[in-house]
C-alpha cells in the first residue's frame, strides 16, 4: 500500500522513479549514503541525524496480537512485561515501546512478520506487535484469522514518511509535501487506503 501511495504521488508530480526492494537495514544505509530514497520509514531522533523526511503520508495503528482472546484489551506498554514478543528488525514501534525494549521490560524476537505470526500461532511467541493493516493482510495470506487475535488498543500511532540523505533532495521533498497537502490528492490517497482496508 505504501508503494501504491507513493506511485500515485510521484506520478502526480511528474517524478520518474524505479523501485528496488532491499532488507530494511541495507535500504537505510543506501539512503543515508545517497543511493536512493526510502519510501516508508518512521522518523526518529537517531535517523534525523543522517536523513531528512517528508511530511507523513499515512498513519499506522501499532497494536499487539495474542494467540487467544484478550479481555479487556491491553492499553499500555507496561502490560507487556515479561512477554516474548515478535518484532521486525529495524522497526520502531513508537517511543514508549522502544524505550521499554531498551529497558528490558520484555523480550523481543526479530524476524519477518510472517514468521512471527506463524510462531505465535504455534505458541512459540507470547505476542506479536506490528501495524494493524499489515497484520490483517498477512493473517489472510497465512489463513490464521482463527488462531491470532487483536489483543490491544493501538499502543502507538506512527507516521509513515519518505526519507532522503540529509541535505539532499530538498526540492523533491518540497514537491512531495506540496502534493500531500492538496485536498484532491488526499482524497485519492484515502480512496486507495480504503480499498486496502476492505
Image: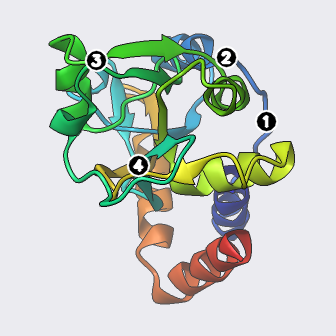
Lower position in the chain sequence, tag 3 or tag 4: 4
Residues at marks 4 and 2, CA–CA distance in whole angstroms: 21 Å
Residue with the mark numbered 4:
62
* Residue 57 x %, y %: 47, 60
Helix, strand or loop at disc 1? loop
Lower position in the chain sequence, tag 4 or tag 1: 1
Residue with the mark numbered 3:
106
Mark drawn on residue 19: 1
Residues at marks 2 and 1, CA–CA distance in whole angstroms: 13 Å
Lower position in the chain sequence, tag 4 or tag 2: 2
Residue drawn 28% across the image and 38% down it: 94
Residue drawn 66% across the image and 72% down it: 197
* Residue 60 x %, y %: 44, 55
Q: Nearer the viewer, mark 4 or mark 1?
A: 4
**Residue 112 visible somewhere in the drawing:** yes
* Residue 161 x %, y %: 45, 47
Rendered image quadrant of residue 92 = top left
Q: Nearer the viewer, mark 3 or mark 4?
A: 3
Amino acid at each position: 500500500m505504501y508503494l501504491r501511495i507513493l506511485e500515485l504521488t510521484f506520478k502526480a508530480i511528474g517524478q520518474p522513479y524505479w523501485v528496488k526492494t532491499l532488507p530494511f537495514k541495507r535500504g537505510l544505509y543506501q539512503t543515508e549514503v545517497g543511493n536512493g530514497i526510502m519510501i516508508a520509514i518512521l522518523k526518529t531522533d537517531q535517523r534525523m541525524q543522517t536523513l531528512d523526511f517528508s511530511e507523513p503520508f499515512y498513519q499506522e495503528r501499532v497494536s499487539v496480537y495474542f494467540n487467544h482472546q484478550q479481555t479487556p484489551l491491553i492499553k499500555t506498554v507496561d502490560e507487556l512485561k515479561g512477554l516474548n514478543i515478535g518484532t521486525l528488525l529495524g522497526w520502531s514501534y513508537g517511543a514508549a515501546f522502544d524505550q521499554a525494549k531498551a529497558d528490558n521490560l520484555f523480550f523481543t524476537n526479530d524476524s519477518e512478520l510472517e514468521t512471527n505470526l506463524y510462531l505465535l500461532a504455534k505458541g512459540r511467541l507470547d505476542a506479536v506487535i506490528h501495524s494493524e493493516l499489515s497484520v490483517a493482510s498477512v493473517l489472510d495470506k497465512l489463513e490464521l484469522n482463527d488462531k491470532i487475535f487483536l489483543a490491544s488498543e493501538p499502543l502507538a500511532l506512527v507516521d509513515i514518511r519518505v526519507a532522503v540523505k540529509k541535505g539532499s533532495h530538498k526540492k523533491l521533498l518540497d514537491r512531495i509535501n506540496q502534493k500531500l497537502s492538496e485536498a484532491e490528492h488526499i482524497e485519492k490517497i484515502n480512496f486507495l487506503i480504503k480499498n486496502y482496508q476492505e
